[in-house]
Amino acid sequence: MAEIPILKIGDCLLVSIQVDMHDRLALALQDDLTERIVADRARGVMIDISALEIVDSFIGRMLNNIAAMSRVLDAVTVVVGMRPAVAITLVELGLGLTGVRTALNVDKGLALIRRIIDTPERDDADRFR
Amino acid sequence: MSEHRNIIHSLIDQHYQALLTDWLACQKRDAGSVVTQRGAENSELAKRFLDEFRRGASAGQLDDIGTPQWAPMRELLDDLSRDRAVQGYSSSETAVFVFSLKEPLFALVRRELSGNSEQLASATWTLSRLIDQFGLYTIESYSKSREDVINRQQQELLELSTPVVELWEGVLALPLIGTLDSSRTQIVMESLLERIVTSGAEMAIIDITGVPTVDTLVAQHLIKTISAARLMGADCILSGIRPQIAQTIVHLGLELNVVSKATMADALALALRRAGKMVVDRKQPATPEA
């Protein structure tokens, strides 16, 4: 079974999903990621889905789960690189991924994580996200 | 049947020139403006029509114009209808071109076949049916061309009315004008998301000054557009909300979950502030260097 690599950039972790997700792979990823957040004391998690042409409700739920788990471990999750067609499909499906932060690309995702970590008090208060 | 065919073919062949002259005279009388405005082109068309008619009649099959030997004729009629539709002539002005052939043709048949009433009646019937078919085909083709024109214009209008403007580096504006239906929302969403990708913008101002009414459906479309932009990492600001629309939104109990501003200017100011930019008066610097 293919394993999804988790890369460390400073105090952030980068996960790039480039294969089709299925149940066991998603569970393995959640396991690995939570372990690594704790082990590396990561403050941010970036999930790059720019290689995915199809994002269904299963992956949507997985992203929400990862975000919730990271939040418990005091790390922010940012989903980056969503394609326009994927965004439209998700919205049409009624999946707004409301629990997850998003950014256009890895670059902007890193900047967003920096911004959130550096100013924790404005985290959720004055942002409609 | 085959003898009519030969009779009709030879009649047209023999009296070709006279028939053409009579026909053009009839067209001039019935159709008026089309013929007088486009005389030369019209007689050219009439000549081509008669040529095709002659050729088609010589091959027989006068009952059905859907057969291959009438293909050049159908093409001719298609061209004619498209031409007239684009130039804005009415459907009857277009169809008169074909139907006006009846009078000179019937006169010719009556003159030539007056000795044999049986033959006369059956030739008249065959010709009448044939010309009716041509006429109906012309009208059908005319309405199809008109529909094409309308569809194209609708498409152009859709694209024209959904521009995405870059107001500042990283700040896009989407001035919506007209009613938001599903097909427009789709185009608005696509063009906005494409622009977010190409420009890397993190802020989008959706201005609804030009949207006449906001009902639950329009609000639904707005929410979709805003969430799609959010998934692409861009924050949306809603602007141009008129007082009545603010009241409607509250009365309908709509929850837009988005920062909204009354005017585009306020929205731009907020976007610039979020981007860490500041607009200062040149005469009185806001932060003196000291």
Image (cartoon, rainbow, N blue to C red):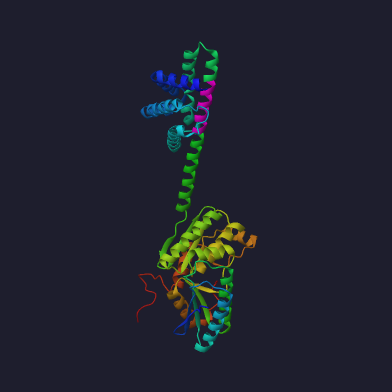
Q: Please, is residue B37 above or below residue B266 in the view?
A: above
Nearer to me, B19 or B97: B19
Would residue A24 be counted in the magenta stretch? Answer: no
Nearer to me, B135 or B150: B135
Q: Please, is residue B97 above or below residue B110 in the view?
A: below
Res. B197 visible in picture: yes
Tell me the quadrant of the picture where the C terminus of chain B can be found: bottom left
Q: Position of residue B275 (x, y in %)?
A: 44, 72
Nearer to me, B223 or A13: A13
Question: Is residue A101 left or right of B36 when viewed as pictured?
Answer: right
Q: Position of residue A101 (x, y in %)?
A: 52, 74
Residue located at (53% from left, 87% from top): A38
Residue located at (37% from left, 30% from top): B41
Would residue B126 be counted in the magenta stretch? Answer: yes
Q: Position of residue A69 (x, y in %)?
A: 58, 81
Q: Position of residue B247 (x, y in %)?
A: 61, 60
Residue range (magenta): B124-138
Query: Main SS of the magenta segment?
Result: helix
Residue located at (64% from left, 60% from top): B252
Q: Please, is residue B256 above or below residue B152 in the view?
A: below
Residue A57 sits in quarter: bottom right
